[in-house]
């Protein structure tokens, strides 16, 4: 089985964030970056599936030069090779523009399966994998919590996480696109042997022209969504403490939520 995995490098979730001077994004200077959590789970799932079938895992990522660090980590974990969409014209894209570019890069090779994370921890669109599936014309599933190949290799048994503790079981023919939920598995650590081997593995750079796309179809120019501003939550010192037992406090809270917050 030949599997493509799309990963994203995101700000460390434990880092202290600052809004950039223009107010449109966070200040990335001296900010540590890591692999997106659900993307790591997607990579681990791909490595397990490929390992059981003697297949190949190719990692794709879009972003500036620093993204090569994330690709090296994926290679150290066991991916065969990587493709970096690092041209500046790819930058600033929404899910539609990014998904279009990744789909074009993936379509250049015959893959059996594409795995992505369910959403990124920075922008959180949760739609890039869906856009990729749309451009490829492949079936897809979101919030995947289980993947099992059927005998014969023509389809997958996929478990999706639903609400209220209910799961949905699908049978998807391959090729397909699956968006993996964080927690599907426990990602492995890179071994010293894997880290050394990653230095010799290929990271191919690509441009929009290589993918048959124009600069107007990718990045900020090809996006349908524009971020106008970002901001940190405003701190508030207001708090209310309800006296009495649990029943009395619950009634008082429900009254506040109904008459003041107007959320129930």
Image (cartoon, rainbow, N blue to C red):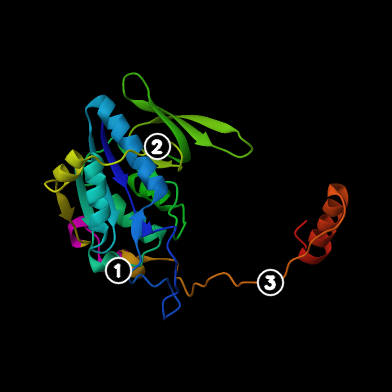
Secondary structure beneath dot 3 equals loop
Residue 104's label in the rendered image is none
User: Looking at the rendering, which quadrant does residue 224 occupy?
Assistant: bottom left
User: Which residue position is annotated with label 3?
Assistant: 237
Provide the residue designation for mark 1.
Answer: 216
Where the C terminus falls, by quadrant? Answer: bottom right
Q: Residue at x 45, y 60 (%)?
A: 123
Image quadrant where one finds the N terminus:
top left
Q: Quadrant of residue 223?
A: bottom left
Which region is colored magenta?
209-217
Residue 75 in the image: x percent, y percent?
Answer: 22, 45
Q: Position of residue 183 (x, y in %)?
A: 46, 39
Q: Nearer the viewer, residue 241 or 87?
A: 241
- Disc number at residue 186? 2
Residue 50 coordinates in the image, percent (x, y): 27, 31
Measure how far apart labels 2 and 1 are at the Cα level. 39 Å
The residue lying at 19 percent from left, 45 percent from top is: 195
Q: Nearer the viewer, mark 3 or mark 2?
A: 3
Q: Nearer the viewer, mark 1 or mark 3?
A: 3
Neighbour tally class for label 3: few under 14, some 14-19, many 20 plus, Cα within 10 Å:
few
Helix, strand or loop for disc 2: loop
N-terminal-most mark, 1 or 3: 1
Magenta highlight on residue 211: yes
Residue lying at the far left of the rendered structure: 200
Q: Could you tell me which residue is drawn at 41 percent across and 46 percent down?
A: 38
Label whose residue precedes the other's in the sequence (3 or 2): 2
């Amino acid at each position: 089985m030949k599997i493509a995995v799309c990963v994203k490098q995101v700000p460390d979730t434990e880092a202290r964030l600052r809004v950039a001077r223009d107010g449109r994004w966070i200040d990335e200077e001296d900010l540590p970056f890591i692999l997106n959590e659900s993307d790591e789970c997607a990579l681990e799932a791909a490595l397990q599936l490929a390992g059981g079938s003697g297949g190949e895992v190719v990692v794709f990522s879009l972003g500036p030069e620093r993204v090569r660090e994330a690709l090296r980590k994926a290679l150290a974990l066991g991916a065969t090779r990587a493709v970096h969409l690092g041209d500046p014209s790819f930058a600033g894209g929404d899910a539609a523009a990014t998904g279009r570019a990744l789909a074009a890069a993936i379509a250049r090779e015959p893959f059996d399966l594409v795995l992505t994370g369910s959403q990124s921890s920075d922008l959180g669109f949760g739609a890039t994998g869906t856009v990729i599936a749309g451009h490829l014309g492949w079936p897809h599933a979101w919030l995947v919590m289980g993947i099992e190949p059927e005998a014969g290799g023509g389809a997958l048994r996929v478990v999706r996480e639903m609400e209220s503790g209910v799961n949905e079981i699908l049978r998807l023919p391959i090729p397909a696109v699956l968006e993996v939920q964080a927690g599907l598995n426990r990602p492995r650590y890179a071994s010293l042997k894997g880290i050394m081997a990653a230095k010799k593995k290929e990271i191919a750079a690509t441009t929009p022209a290589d993918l048959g796309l124009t600069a107007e179809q990718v990045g900020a120019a090809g996006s349908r969504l524009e971020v106008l501003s970002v901001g940190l939550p405003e701190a508030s010192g207001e708090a209310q403490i309800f006296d009495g037992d649990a029943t009395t406090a619950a009634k008082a809270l429900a009254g506040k939520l109904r008459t003041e917050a107007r959320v129930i």
